[in-house]
Image (cartoon, rainbow, N blue to C red):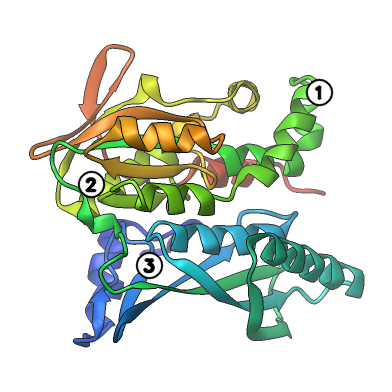
Amino acid sequence: MLGAMRAGKLSPRLLRERVFPYLGRRADVLVHARVGEDCAVLDFGPSVCVVTCDPITGAAEHLGHLAVHVACNDLATTGAEVVGLLLTLLLAEATAEADLDRIMREAGEAAQAVGIEIVGGHTEVTPGLDRSLVVMTAIGRAPRDGFVSAGGGRPGDALVLTKGAGIEGTAILALDLADRLSRQVDTAVLARARAFIHRISVVLEGRIAAGRGATAMHDVTEGGILTGVWELAEASGCGVHLDADAVPVAPETRAICDALGVDPLGLVSSGAMLIATPDPAAAQAALADAGISSAVIGMLTDSDRVVRRGGAESPLVPLDRDELWRVLESQPTAG
């Protein structure tokens, strides 16, 4: 069908041409919607209200857990304190009450771990869905002069990445494709990979980086490291040099990606925070004190956006789709 779209988040072109022109404009919105920006910031006088919204669409398990942490991660990119969550739950008609209970129990436990309340939302059984979907809105606050945005990076800032590539995608693939992977990947490796689901919060590193002079932060989600770095550079109006070989990739992620023919740098990476900073040593020392690993993977520039991998250099562009969607849609259908 002419003009039909594939699964996954919309491309920068579609956002600019089909979405952003219709959003309107208000003077009390301090950070507006744009490519690469995780949150909107609203002027509330002496403080600001920070808001974001995220769906969980690519996972079949741990929907409640993922929804809470992914939304809170977006707020963490601003250094804001998370105040509350609004949960929209669209249940497939085949959903059992036990499934509903599991989603909500996980969401409640995750919210409690972050120290926030789910203050409302909407729940319904929705015709036409083949799986349940969760959409989470997070609300936070920050001092008016004390928040960070993805658009604050400057040429010369180093790019620091926490943890590594493909954290969320590793967990989802190990959970959802367990049968397929068990023929190629050791069971102990798969068990450790499934536990990556507990590594996806970046709330702590967002708070640390904001207090150590970060100029911009970006939660690395759909499209992985390659898209996340491009999006931060786009939001900041900068060029960027990305050293792909410097990006940490956990052995569990590498094993699963090798088995499935996946590029770990293009795999959804909630759990990794991308930090632009003029003082990477100070940021990394503070992160290390909190037990958070990190690596310098590139630098913002005033020129081109390029990625260097294996000694070769090529243009850095956002991926058309995340590797997770490509793999899941290649799965054979039953029957």
- Is residue 131 in sight in this rendering? no
Q: CA distance from mark 1 to mark 3?
A: 38 Å
Identify the residue shown where x is 63% and y is 43%.
Answer: 199
Task: Verify CB contact (< 8 Å) between mark 2 and mark 3.
Answer: no
- Is residue 119 in sight in this rendering? yes
Q: Is residue 204 above or below residue 251?
A: below
Residue type, label 3: Cys
Q: Nearer the viewer, residue 107 or 177?
A: 107
Numbered tag placed on residue 304 in the rendering: none
Numbered tag placed on residue 233 in the rendering: 2
Q: Is residue 219 above or below residue 245?
A: below
Q: Residue 257 at x, y = what percent?
A: 59, 27
Q: Residue 141 at x, y = what percent?
A: 42, 74
The answer to whether residue 175 is left or right of residue 10 is right
Q: CA distance from mark 1 to mark 2?
A: 38 Å
Numbered tag placed on residue 188 in the rendering: 1
Q: Residue 142 at x, y = what percent?
A: 38, 71
Tell me the quadrant of the picture where the N terminus can be found.
bottom left
Looking at the image, tell me whether mark 1 or mark 2 is earlier in sequence order: 1
Numbered tag placed on residue 39 in the rendering: 3
Q: Is residue 251 above or below residue 220?
A: above
Looking at the image, tell me whether mark 2 or mark 3 is earlier in sequence order: 3
Q: CA distance from mark 2 to mark 3?
A: 16 Å
